[in-house]
Amino acid sequence: MAKRLALVEDDDVLRANYADLLSRAGFSVAAYSDKEAALTAFAEALPDIVLLDIALGSERDAGFEICGELRRRSMTLPIVFLTSHDGDVDKISGLRLGADDYLTKDVSIDYLTVRIETLLRRLETLASAPSCANALRPVPSRSSLDIDDSVSRAWWQGTEVDLPLTQFWMLRELCRHPGQVISHAALMRAARIVVEPNTITAHVKAIRDAFRRIDPGFDCIRTERGRGYRWVPPSSEGQVTASVAATRR
């Protein structure tokens, strides 16, 4: 069955062109021209993946608002910004809201298709993993950070960290190798995405923001300029607590 792709684009010509090209690539495309139409459709059922423009009609930040609403409903739904806005501020804003990728409209349809298919394969990997339907917050441990791989969730100081799947997998990779420098390429592989290095940088900033909403003094993710990032546990701690579900197995 063809994957259901939602396209939110206010330009009539671009919307029709993208819908046609993506349909030819094998997707079942539903296209929307404004925020209200898209949100009404998403309230009835979520698609398999969403492509969003930022400005829709007179609403400059409509795409950001849609992204935020979708993330409140699902932390695993792949969301990609496809926009003419190429500034770093917009890119960082989109990724901090939980988007998985940020592309500008000069991208080729072949490259766009590859990025979409990569995100969809990642979901299939997650779906095939052992599940823990009744997972709750882990039993408090001596570590500030608890990670449960079975439900792709993390807790800092006993409070759940609000992370979409892309950023959870990056965090997990950092924490698996405390003290070691993890390159942009390694984080990309861990998150099963194909993006530019500055997109990884924006994701890491978003991860830090999520922790600092819980703990303003959080400083465990260090930047090693030109090399990547390191997870540095609080001085009183060692390894991150293992998955609750994993220890049960």
Image: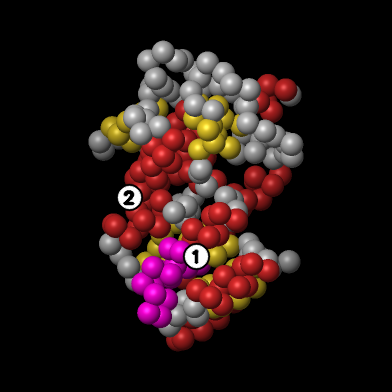
Q: Measured from the top left, where is residue 182 in percent x and y? A: 39, 32
Viewer-proximal residue, 74 or 5? 74
Left or right for 155, reference 83:
right
Q: Kindly identify which residue carries mark 2.
A: 198
Mark 2 residue type: Asn
Q: Please tell me whether residue 6 belongs to the stretch shown in magenta.
A: no
Left or right for 31, reference 249:
left
Q: Kindly identify which residue carries mark 1.
A: 66
Residue 118: tell me if it is visible.
Answer: no
Which of the 4 image quadrants contains residue 129?
top right
Above or below, 21 relative to 74: below
Residue at the image point whose x is 47% and y is 35% from the top: 171
Q: The N terminus lies in which quarter of the figure?
A: bottom right
* Mark nearer the N terminus (2 vs 1): 1
Q: Measured from the top left, where is residue 142 in percent x and y? A: 52, 16
Viewer-proximal residue, 223 or 90? 90
Left or right for 215, reference 1:
left
Task: Find the magenta span and give its range.
Answer: 51-65
Residue at the image point whose x is 58% and y is 37% from the top: 153
